[in-house]
Image: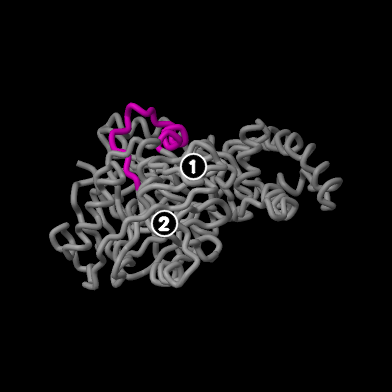
Amino acid sequence: MPAIVIVGAQWGDEGKGKATDLLGSRVDYVVKPNGGNNAGHTVVVGGEKFELKLLPAGILSPNATPVIGNGVVVSLDALFHEIDGLEARGADTSRLRISANAHLVAPYHQTMDKVTERFLGKRAIGTTGRGIGPAYMDKVGRLGIRVQDIFDESILRQKIEGALRQKNELLVKLYNRRAVAVDEIAEYFLSFAERLRPMVVDSTLLLNDALDRGDVVLMEGGQATYLDVDHGTYPFVTSSNPTAGGASVGAGIGPTRINRSIGIVKAYTTRVGAGPFPTELFDEWGEFLQNTGGEFGVNTGRPRRCGWYDAVMARHASRINGFTDYFLTKLDVLTGIEQIPVCVAYDVDGVRHDEMPMTQTEFHHAKPIVEHFPGWTEDISDARNLDDLPENARNYVLALERMSGTRISGIGVGPGRDEVVTVHDLID
């Protein structure tokens, strides 16, 4: 059975958790292939809201095995805090499996993250301060500590010594912080070893064996396309590849085994943190989208910047990820708007761009060229088929589909698990 990948098509917060949870009852494995506890999902089950940060959204699906893939950076504090919180609410987390090759977030990564952001001042990226970027830097710099290392104290201490040699120089001499002791970090990691051990697996073997048996494997990417370190709005990006290709690497599943690439796209656009945002609104409509859509970060509570739907970005995201389907979320938030603007192209210093500008400078200068679509006032939360939507809502969806270059197969019309319009089956 081929694998399925879910990817955010904007700057994150599109509702990937809802889409993953919706499919979770129909798949056998749900894998998180990238990111860390900086990539939150909100899932509503039976009217109860669950905010997931590090764990795959599939943790709430009774039939699926949730897997943290090799491409994730894992904060053990955050992991067990989240597990304990879910179990206190009656959730079963016993099926969770974690790749032995996943890298670990150390306390000094969080320290480096925070002091570096302060040091950058006006040029700060707007990170969550969770240590994700520094952990990925150590991974690429071959100074990282992996999950498997905490089961061999000798190797663990050697790796900590290697990582701290440079970091202590920076902390003490540049940032005026105290040096970090090897023993302190070793004891921190070793304190989790016994609880972690039963969860750790060779995730690549586990998932490929599952595919060979005919099981369905769903990969849920953290963050989103425009936060991808290669394809996003660099440097205002994350430190991993939250695109479809990155999901293949981060889960250890070959690209030829993926047959569905599903993009999650909001019916408008939001982003958290710094960076360019052509359709961003600074008026009452920005406040309307923020308040009506509940646009506040799962991890940090930061208000999300809001703007209208950007069809140029959606087309480009579809191209990068090879999307077979789009899942459109939060259509209900637009209810009551008389005329809904959509960005169809950019004006860059008087020149029209129908596709993404090539350079960072051009994208920073891009101004949206918009078309307006008639809105609707009817409550759409009970719609389950495309024909159930009011005519103007249906026309809006079809216009987005045409401009975005990929068919829209599902539509979120409310926060609940069942508040979805199904246009095409996302698995069969």
Residue 409: x and y in percent read 23, 48
Q: Of the residues shown, which amino acid type is indicated by label 1?
A: Asn
Say which residue label 2 marks. Answer: 269
Left or right of 323 on screen, residue 359: right
Residue 272 is situated, as x and y percent measured from the top left of the image, at 52, 57
Q: Nearer the viewer, residue 77 or 271?
A: 271
Report x, y in % for residue 301. Answer: 53, 66
In the image, 73: left or right of 390?
right
Q: Is residue 46 above or below residue 165?
A: below
Q: Quadrant of the N terminus?
A: top left
Q: Residue furthest left?
A: 387
Residue 54, numbered label: none
Q: Is residue 91 magenta?
A: no
Assess disc 2: are there few (<14), some (14-19) or many (≥20) residues with their C-alpha within 10 Å of its C-alpha: many
Q: According to the image, label 1 marks what residue?
A: 34
Identify residue type, mark 2: Thr
Q: State the residue in front, 354 or 257.
A: 354
| Label 2 SS | strand
Specify the color scheme. one colour
Q: Sequence order check: which comes first, mark 2 or mark 1?
A: 1
User: Gap between marks 2 and 1, in whole Å?
Assistant: 22 Å
Q: Which residues are magenta?
A: 244-263
Residue lying at 40% horizontally and 55% vertically, measured from the top left: 14
Q: Position of residue 383 (x, y in %)?
A: 19, 64
